Every structure is written in structure tokens, then in C-alpha cells.
Image: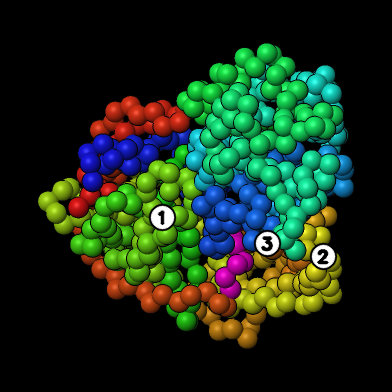
């Protein structure tokens, strides 16, 4: 591996703003970061794999990336700069009956996306994320991504140009969206560098397919990649774009748009670097076009050493603490199999509370290496993830107050400590915990419905949850309850947002200093999450954003052996690094020359 490639991979490890902006826990940032860089939600269901690497859809052979990018544009197109309304707000799901939004690709894309929103990642966030994946997987720029879009629950105004519209209509529609006439030309070219026009949608432009069951699609240019062929072939006069090269002049919308400034913008886009930089800038603006009053997050950048899946729970009649540390590995270097990753923690109660008397530690119980193609973003970055899973037994009388990690490569380099920038990773409360292994979800059929995109019947279900939580013995709670949320519901008629109560379940014996409480919930959606609450002596203790994807089917990992007299390097040491500037896309990134955890062998 060349020193340049090593530096390139390491450069992605820390955004210049990252260390000052992020502290764990940050559930919204964590959820968005997992989607962007791992391509999946927390239960492992992968969104990016539907489009990556630059896939065509089975059956139709349409570019999935083009459909996803088009979907995002049509959602954004409801924006009106004059009054601040509309934009990327997820309203497109209620607008698919309009002539501007018709076609098989829209319905298939909606089906791709509908199971992925959750409490911290909105439907509109998923639409924007899908477009980021679409551009990157087909070789386009990595468009900076932010979250925080707020979903609408009704349709917005019409705003997407149609091929038969006049040039003045196009200009006015793009103006309302916030783009100048010059930007209209460039954004159209960026949107039409992938994908094409299918016969069923525009029979006046594309002849009928001769292959039964497969549409006839004429691509906008001669490649399936996100490149500037849309411009160079147009300027050379050999374009296959049917919105340019057609005897039906009424439908030649790209021709009218491209030549509206005497081809000046298209000539500038014939330079590949200009094309990529212009598309990155305009698409970022497009994805960030939101209704007035909506504030987006900071740019979501890679967390170099990410803690996830933290949970105090009961498994096999034992109180355990579970945590995971995700480290980053360059794809063209071997993982150091001699590496050891150790978790250290402090008791919450007793003589050794807050590590006054001793510090406990345990090695990882399992190591999992991700697929380097989990997300087109990390594939382009040349890295993949290695997860160190920890499961340790906990005494209820001691509990746990905070934890951190040490990474030792055993190669003469210094041990690296990951400790939340010196703050350690806190366990905020232990008064109420979720017990997935004592919880179940049963499926009750709601009958069949017609799937719009296939005209085949599908079956809808209600999930009937029987959920169990545990509350510390002796707390005498006045109420044990949860706020349940789900915004991933077929066709998005509403979001589930309700409260459920738990009752003491005396049929389950106390374990590890905890009593058990049970309750039931019904949901027709895909992504139920819980915020757990217990009221004790006028104080409410809460556990936020608890997933229900894995319940009694939770994979079991044998707990590691605990060292009760550990001697960590330091619980307040911060990972050392040397920084040098590196520009990737439009973002200035600190180039980390770290000794660990990414030792290259």
C-alpha cells in the first residue's frame, strides 16, 4: 500500500470540526452517521445495498440511482422561496397521483425507502440520503449530508417541470425552488447524467419494448455513470437524450433548457472537474432545501471510533452490560489479528464507585468485520469497519457508571484510549432497562392489498408486542411506562406516537437486583422504538430510543471474563494525533497520522 493511499484512507478519520462538535451519546447524529457510512439502520437492514454498486432494478432494468435522485428532486420541487413553504419534507409520498410525478420508478422507490425512517431519521432525511448514495455509487461526487428534515403529512404544491412546459415555465419553477436560470441548466444536466426515459411513461418519445415484461428505456447518455457525457455528447451533436434529440419539439425540454444561454453553461460543464464540482454544490443545495423554520444538523462526518449498541439488560438469568466499539480499517491493508481491544468501567455503587477502589475490565467477546461495500461512501473512501462486541456480567449492587476502551496493537506502538474526548462514556441511568430476550412480537394479518408497482397482492400485518422492562428493586416506582414511536408505516398515513404502561410481572422472579414489568403494544409500522420511563419519588428516569427489532430472537454472545483489578493506561487520556490538511470533495478534513487503531501491516 502506497504512503499516499495510506494517508488518503487515514484522512477520512476526522473532520476538522468533528472533535469539538460530537460527544457520545448523540442519538440523532449516531443514527444518521450509521446510515451514511454503514449504509444501514441499527438492526443491520441495509438501504445502500439496494442501489450499490450502481445497480439496475431487477425486472425493469432501470437505474435505481437515477430513480432515487429523481425522487429527491421531485420532493424538493414543492419549495417556494416566496413564502418559504415546501422543499425536502417527504410530501412527495402524497403527490404520486400527479402528472408530474407519475411512473413506475416513483412507486418502486417509495417501496425501497418506506421501512427506514425512525424517530431521529425522518422520511425526508431518507430521501436525501438515498440521493447521496445514488450519486456516489455511480461515480459522482460525495455530496455532504445533513439530517434534521421535518416530515410533512399532507401534499405540497405542484412544482416539478414537465417536458411539455415552456422555457419560461421551467425558469419560473426553478426560481421558486431557489435556483437561477444558469443553475437550472446545470442542475438539469446533473440530474440527467444517469437514467433515461421509459416507453410506458413517455410513449411519444420512446418506442414500445419488444421484450415482454421489460420496459424500453433510452438512457440520457452513453454511460450509466455519473459523468459529464450528458454535456460532451450534447455539444458534439451525438447525444441519445430523447429530451434533446426528438422530432417532437414540444417535448424537447432539455434542448430548450441547455441552449437557453447559448450553450455557455453546457460548454463549462464539458470540463469534468467543473461538472463534478458544480453538481456537488447544486445537489447539496437541493438536498438542503427545506421549509422555513427547519434547522438541519451539522454535516454528518465519520466518527473515527464509534460506540454503539450500549445496553444494560438481562440475558439467561444474568444482568449484563453490552457495548460495541467500531473501528476503521483501510480496505487494502490487513487487519492486525494481534490487536486486543479492552473495555474498562467503573462501578456506580459500593466501595469502588467511580473507580475509587478498583477498575474492572474485560476483552471483547466477539469481533465482526463489515463488508467494504456496505455503503458507497466508505467504498469510495477506501475503508471498512471492524466491530468489537463486549458483553460483561454486572453485579446489581455495583452496576456501572462509565466505561472506555484501550486498543493495543502489540507491535511496539503506544496503546490508544478511546474515552469520549476525555469524558468517558457515561451510563446515565440504571433505574429502568429493556429486556429484549423476555419480549416478543407476533404478526397478525390485516388482509391483502395491491402493490402499486407490481399489481400483485401483498399482505399487511399488525405487530403485537409483548414487552418486558426491569426496574431496580426497592425503588417503589409510581409509574413504569414508555413513549412508543413509529413513522415507517406503509403509505405514511400517520406516525404512531403513543404511551403505554407496564405492570409488575410477578411471574418472573427478580434477577440481579431488578423486578420485571410487562406491557403490550400494537403497531402496523416497521420501526417501533421506545423511550422508557420510570417515576420514582418525583424523579423520572428515562432510556431514549430503544429499538424493538431484536427481541426474543436476540443473538446470544457468551459474556467475557471480568478482571476485577484492572490497571488502565488512563481514564482521561485522549487519543493523540498529528494533523495536516486534506481536501476531500468540498470538506476540509484533518489528516490524522494515528499510531492506532488503524495500524497498517
Residue receiving disc 3? 59
Sequence-wise, the earlier of marks 1 and 3 is: 3
Can residue 407 be seen here?
yes
Q: Secondary structure at mark 2?
A: loop
Question: What x and y, as percent, mark residue 522?
Answer: 76, 69
Sequence-wise, the earlier of marks 2 and 1 is: 1
Determine the residue positioned at 47% across, 55% down.
374
The reply to whether the magenta stretch includes residue 545 is yes
The residues colored magenta run: 543-551
Q: Is residue 292 left or right of residue 556?
A: right
Q: Residue furthest left?
A: 412
Say which of 56 and 12 sits in front.
Answer: 56
Give the Cα separation between the discs numbered 2 and 1.
Answer: 36 Å
Sequence-wise, the earlier of marks 3 and 2 is: 3
Question: What x and y, as percent, mark residue 456?
Answer: 80, 69
The reply to whether the magenta stretch includes residue 192 is no
Q: Secondary structure at mark 1?
A: loop
As drawn, the label of residue 308 is none
Q: Residue furthest bottom?
A: 507
Residue receiving disc 1? 372
Amino acid at each position: 500500500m502506497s504512503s499516499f493511499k495510506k494517508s488518503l484512507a487515514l484522512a477520512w478519520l476526522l473532520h476538522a470540526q468533528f472533535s469539538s462538535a460530537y460527544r457520545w451519546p448523540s442519538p440523532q447524529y449516531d443514527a444518521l452517521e450509521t446510515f451514511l457510512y454503514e449504509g444501514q439502520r441499527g438492526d443491520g437492514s441495509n438501504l445502500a445495498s439496494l442501489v450499490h454498486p450502481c445497480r439496475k432494478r431487477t425486472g425493469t432494468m432501470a437505474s435505481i440511482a437515477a430513480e432515487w435522485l429523481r425522487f429527491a428532486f421531485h420532493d424538493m420541487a414543492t419549495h417556494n422561496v416566496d413564502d418559504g413553504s415546501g422543499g425536502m419534507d417527504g410530501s412527495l409520498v402524497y403527490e404520486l397521483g400527479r402528472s408530474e410525478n407519475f411512473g413506475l420508478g416513483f412507486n418502486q422507490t417509495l417501496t425501497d425507502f418506506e421501512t427506514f425512517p425512525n424517530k431521529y431519521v425522518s422520511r425526508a432525511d431518507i430521501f436525501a440520503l438515498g440521493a447521496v448514495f445514488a450519486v456516489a455509487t455511480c461515480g459522482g461526487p460525495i455530496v455532504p449530508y445533513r439530517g434534521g428534515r421535518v416530515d410533512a403529512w399532507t401534499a405540497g404544491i405542484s412544482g416539478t417541470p414537465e417536458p411539455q412546459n415552456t422555457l419560461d415555465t421551467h425558469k419560473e419553477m426553478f426560481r421558486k425552488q431557489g435556483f437561477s436560470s444558469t443553475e437550472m441548466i446545470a442542475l438539469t444536466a446533473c440530474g440527467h447524467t444517469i437514467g433515461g426515459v421509459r416507453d410506458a411513461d413517455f410513449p411519444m418519445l420512446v418506442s414500445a419494448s419488444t421484450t415482454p415484461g421489460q420496459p424500453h428505456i433510452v438512457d440520457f447518455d452513453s454511460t450509466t455513470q455519473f459523468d459529464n457525457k450528458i454535456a460532451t455528447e450534447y455539444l458534439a451533436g451525438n447525444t441519445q437524450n430523447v429530451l434533446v434529440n426528438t422530432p417532437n419539439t414540444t417535448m424537447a425540454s432539455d434542448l430548450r433548457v441547455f441552449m437557453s444561454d447559448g450553450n455557455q453553461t453546457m460548454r463549462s460543464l464539458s470540463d469534468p472537474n467543473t461538472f463534478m464540482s458544480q453538481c456537488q454544490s447544486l445537489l447539496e443545495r437541493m438536498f438542503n432545501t427545506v421549509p422555513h423554520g427547519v434547522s438541519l444538523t451539522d454535516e454528518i462526518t465519520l466518527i473515527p471510533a464509534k460506540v454503539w449498541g450500549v445496553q444494560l439488560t438481562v440475558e439467561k438469568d444474568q444482568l449484563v452490560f453490552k457495548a460495541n466499539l467500531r473501528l476503521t480499517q483501510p480496505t487494502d491493508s490487513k487487519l492486525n489479528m494481534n490487536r486486543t481491544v479492552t473495555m474498562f468501567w467503573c462501578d456506580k455503587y459500593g466501595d469502588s464507585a467511580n473507580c475509587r477502589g478498583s477498575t474492572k475490565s474485560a476483552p471483547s467477546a466477539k469481533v465482526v468485520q463489515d463488508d467494504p461495500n456496505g455503503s458507497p461512501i466508505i467504498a469510495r473512501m477506501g475503508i471498512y469497519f471492524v466491530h468489537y462486541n463486549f458483553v460483561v456480567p454486572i453485579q446489581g449492587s455495583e452496576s456501572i457508571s462509565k466505561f472506555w476502551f484501550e486498543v493495543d496493537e502489540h507491535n511496539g506502538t503506544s496503546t490508544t484510549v478511546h474515552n469520549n474526548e476525555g469524558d468517558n462514556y457515561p451510563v446515565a441511568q440504571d433505574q429502568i432497562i429493556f429486556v429484549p430476550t423476555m419480549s416478543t412480537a407476533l404478526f397478525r394479518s390485516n388482509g391483502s392489498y395491491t402493490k402499486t408497482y407490481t399489481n400483485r397482492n401483498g399482505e399487511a400485518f399488525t405487530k403485537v408486542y409483548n414487552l418486558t422492562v426491569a426496574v431496580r428493586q426497592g425503588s417503589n416506582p409510581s409509574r413504569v411506562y414508555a413513549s412508543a414511536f413509529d413513522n415507517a408505516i406503509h403509505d405514511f398515513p400517520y406516525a404512531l406516537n403513543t404511551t403505554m404502561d407496564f405492570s409488575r410481572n410477578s411471574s418472573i422472579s427478580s434477577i440481579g437486583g431488578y423486578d420485571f414489568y410487562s406491557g403490550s403494544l400494537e403497531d402496523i409500522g416497521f420501526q417501533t422504538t421506545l423511550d422508557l420511563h420510570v417515576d420514582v419519588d418525583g424523579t423520572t428516569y428515562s432510556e431514549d430510543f430503544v429499538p424493538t427489532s431484536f427481541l426474543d430472537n436476540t443473538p446470544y454472545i457468551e459474556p467475557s471474563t471480568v478482571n476485577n483489578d484492572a490497571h488502565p493506561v488512563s481514564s482521561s487520556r485522549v487519543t493523540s494525533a498529528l494533523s495536516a490538511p486534506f481536501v476531500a470533495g468540498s470538506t476540509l478534513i484533518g489528516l490524522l497520522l494515528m499510531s492506532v487503531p488503524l495500524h497498517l501491516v
